[in-house]
Image (cartoon, rainbow, N blue to C red):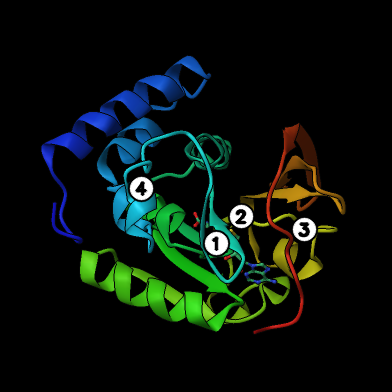
């Protein structure tokens, strides 16, 4: 297998992963289709780990960060209810895998990453794979006001609280999915900005993410 190629073995492993996610409760066809399409093994820097790319696990990607577990990616993406053509802001680009899943669903994606080395590697990776997403090195606590408002905002690191700029950058009718909590475990929160410009908030279980940090590196 060459480093940047897809193959039958990987495609078969992806089909199995999609089945596994179905049995774990992921039902949105658009989400399952995207997971079935995006070659997760190409988002790993460490070739030894690449063999495990279709296990439902998180793995290290450098800078002390991780590529999220496929179930978590699928769960957040399903909660986000992304529609083709939606403007989506992602906070925490990491490996770019979630970014690619959103792009594969037809979303127009902006993504912010605080670690410069990760930002640079992932920008090159997504570019070479042909995914169109606008990547920025910056602090996700500020969102990305230049391109706001967004239909959807997705945070892929554990936030100590819901950053106000993210709520402000939501379009009316839009929603924000964000894991919130200061310890090792966060609650998955979905906030909707309703038509009358009030906010609704729901919680959807516990997850473990790397922490959202303020200082840019
Ligand atoms: N979506 C990624 C998840 C990576 S882990 C993937 O599938 O690979 C979360 C990422 O959030 C890490 O890369 C981390 O560096 C980044 N992060 C943490 N705090 C941040 C902040 N304040 N702004 C932007 N990114 C942040």
* Image quadrant assignment for residue 15: top left
Rendered residue at 25%/41% (across/down): 37
Q: Quadrant of ligand 1?
A: bottom right
How far apart are labels 1 and 2 at the CA level? 7 Å
Q: Are marks 3 and 2 in contact (CB under 8 Å)?
A: no
Residue 203 drawn at (x, y percent): 78, 34
- Residue 199 location (% of width, % of height): 79, 48
Q: Are marks 1 and 2 in contact (CB under 8 Å)?
A: yes
In the picture, measured across the screen, residue 147 lies left or right of residue 42, that is right
> For this view, does 120 lie left or right of residue 9?
right
Mark 4 vs mark 2, CA separation in Å: 21 Å
Assess mark 4: CB under 8 A from ligand 1? no
Q: Position of residue 54 (x, y in %)?
A: 36, 37
User: What residue is disc 4 on?
Assistant: 84
Q: Quadrant of residue 130?
A: bottom left
Front tag of 4 and 2: 2
């Amino acid at each position: 297998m060459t480093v940047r190629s897809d193959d039958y073995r990987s495609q078969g492993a992806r089909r199995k992963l999609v089945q596994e996610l179905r049995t774990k409760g992921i039902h949105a066809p658009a989400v399952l289709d995207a997971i079935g399409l995006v070659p997760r093994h190409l988002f790993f820097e460490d070739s030894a780990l690449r063999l495990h790319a279709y296990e439902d696990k998180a793995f290290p990607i450098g800078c002390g960060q991780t590529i999220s577990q496929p179930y978590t990616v699928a769960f957040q993406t399903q909660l986000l209810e992304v529609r083709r053509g939606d403007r989506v802001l992602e906070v925490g680009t990491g490996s770019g895998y979630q970014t690619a899943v959103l792009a594969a669903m037809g979303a127009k994606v902006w993504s912010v990453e605080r670690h410069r080395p990760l930002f640079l590697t992932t920008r090159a990776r997504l570019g070479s794979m042909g995914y169109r997403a606008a990547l920025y090195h910056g602090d996700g606590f500020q969102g990305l006001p230049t391109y706001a408002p967004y239909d959807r905002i997705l945070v892929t690191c554990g936030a100590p609280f819901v950053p106000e700029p993210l709520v402000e950058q939501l379009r009316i009718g839009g929603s924000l999915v964000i894991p919130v909590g200061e310890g090792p475990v966060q609650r998955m929160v979905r906030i909707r900005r309703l038509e009358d410009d009030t906010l609704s908030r729901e919680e959807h279980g516990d997850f473990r993410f790397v922490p959202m940090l303020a200082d840019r590196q």
